[in-house]
Amino acid sequence: MNAIREQKEEAVKITVEYQCVHAGHEMQPGKLRIHQEDRRNLAALLKVGVPRAKIIENIQTKCPPTERLGLLTRKDLQNLSQSFKVDESVLHAEDAVSVDLQVKEMQRDSYPF
């Protein structure tokens, strides 16, 4: 915004030029917000226990990096978990089933060291 102020004797004249287009840098998809519908869909995946790495991998293969979802990060999913109050430690309401699911997940994701 450019503003020019001219003062002559007691009268004040102010001229303002408003630029409605954002300028200074290009639009960056990573700085954009994730759409509400996409947020709900991602939260639903987290609630049913889909691993974060799998969500990111699937999204990145389907969405180009020029779209916000194509730049999805683990931090985005962590923020969604907090926003939607997703408790990823509880995989099932029944304790026995939850423990069984956790063991299977650990076996599937285990890394030989």
Image (cartoon, rainbow, N blue to C red):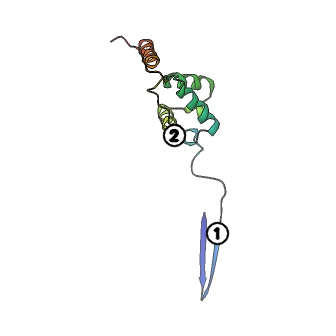
- Residue 28, horizontal then vertical, whole percent: 57, 41
Residue occupying the point 60% across, 79% down: 6
Front: mark 2 or 1: 2
Q: Amino acid at mark 1?
A: Val
Above or below 47: residue 112:
above
> In this rendering, is residue 29 above or below 4?
above
Up-down: is 23 above or below 7?
Answer: above
Q: Earlier in the sequence, mark 2 or mark 1?
A: 1
Type of residue at label 2? Ser
Q: Residues within 10 Å of mark 2 (few under 14, many from 20)?
A: few
- Residue at image point 45% right, 16% down: 105
Give the CA separation, mark 2 to mark 1: 41 Å
| Residue that lies at the very extreme toward the bottom in this rendered image | 9
Q: Which of these two is toward me, 17 or 58?
A: 58
* Residue behind mark 2: 83
From the top left corner, tell me how far across and down residue 79 is, in percent.
49, 38
Q: Nearer the viewer, residue 34 or 106?
A: 106
Res 107 seen here: yes
Locate residue 113, reporting x and y percent. 32, 12
Residue 86: x, y in percent?
50, 33
Q: Is residue 35 visible?
A: no
Instruction: Report helix, strand or loop for mark 2.
Output: helix
Residue to which mark 1 is pinned:
16
